Image: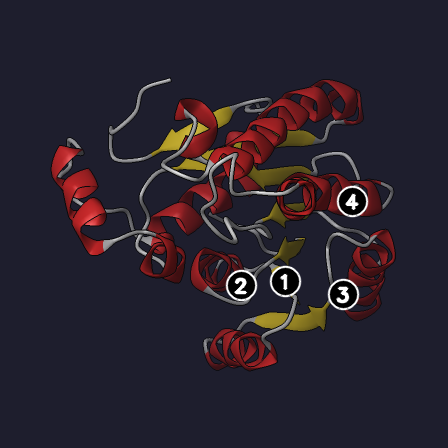
Amino acid sequence: MDLKGKVVIVTGGARDIGREISLKLAASGAKVGINYFDNEEDAKLTLKMVKDAGGQAIIVQGDMTSLADAERMVAETCKAFGNTVHGLVNVAGGLVARKTVEEMDEKFWDFLMSVNAKTVFLATKACVSKMTEGGSIVNFASQAARDGGGPGASAYATAKGAVMTFTRSMAKELGPKKIRVNALCPGMIATSFHDRFTKDAVRANVAAGTPLRREGDAKEIADLVAYLLSEESSFVTGTNIDINGGLYFS
């Protein structure tokens, strides 16, 4: 995908899927503002990888549950690359922990809603005033939002369901401004997310039950993001796209 001249912000862009997206966008010609929360080492490595490949990027620490930090992310990116943001990719989020309804408390529920849904709202709010006609936003939902998630993932699945609905709402609201909004609903992707939260036996069973008989790769997610940010997808908006190897059909 040709993204030359585009400025794109990637929240949670320093590792795993976010890193692959940052690398792909930079390789496609975009100037990338890479947000990270607490792992500066990962962020610096991602930045080095981008620059070693001839790309342009900056890294900015920030908590995307804070509007002030989201606005600072946008301001720093604009300071580095110009006063316009052409794309936003909302990767920031996470399962955090698996807890049943009986195990979780109100604080845990609120935190999962904040880190997975509020982050998308705040980053979008911070970016749209800098977006011009032709802008594109890509959110990250999950297959869990389609099927309710695995054991102990109800709060995560619910938050990602909110992302799906917010995506549709923003497609309607921002469409007249010629800004497109879409979301991805990834299935089992080989990342540290599943290394931490999913047992090996479960991963093997899921892969075996997938028509393609494997987990997905983060680079495959990045390729789809690049498409949704490019002119080639100029009539695609309001979609929640499943990318799961055929494991689940919406």
Say which amino acid is labelled 1.
Answer: Val
In space, the residues marked 2 and 1 are separated at their CA atoms by 6 Å
Crowding at dot 3, Cα within 10 Å, few <14 / some 14-19 / many 20+, comes out as some
Tell me which label, 2 or 4, sits earlier in the chain: 2
Q: Secondary structure at mark 1?
A: strand
Closer to viewer: mark 4 or mark 1: 4
Residue 242 figure quarter: top left
Estimate the x, y position of residue 172 in percent, counting from the top left. 72, 18
Tell me which label, 2 or 1, sits earlier in the chain: 2
Give the residue at mark 4: 122
Residue 121 figure quarter: top right
Tell me which label, 4 or 3, sits earlier in the chain: 3
In space, the residues marked 2 and 3 are separated at their CA atoms by 13 Å
Q: Is residue 138 above or below residue 238?
A: below
Which numbered disc covers residue 81?
3
Q: Residue at x 12, y 39 (%)?
A: 208
Give the residue at mark 1: 32
Tell me which label, 3 or 1, sits earlier in the chain: 1
Tell me which label, 2 or 3, sits earlier in the chain: 2
Tell me which label, 4 or 1, sits earlier in the chain: 1
Residue 124 figure quarter: top right
Q: Are marks 2 and 1 in contact (CB under 8 Å)?
A: yes
Say which amino acid is labelled 3.
Answer: Phe
Give the residue at mark 2: 26
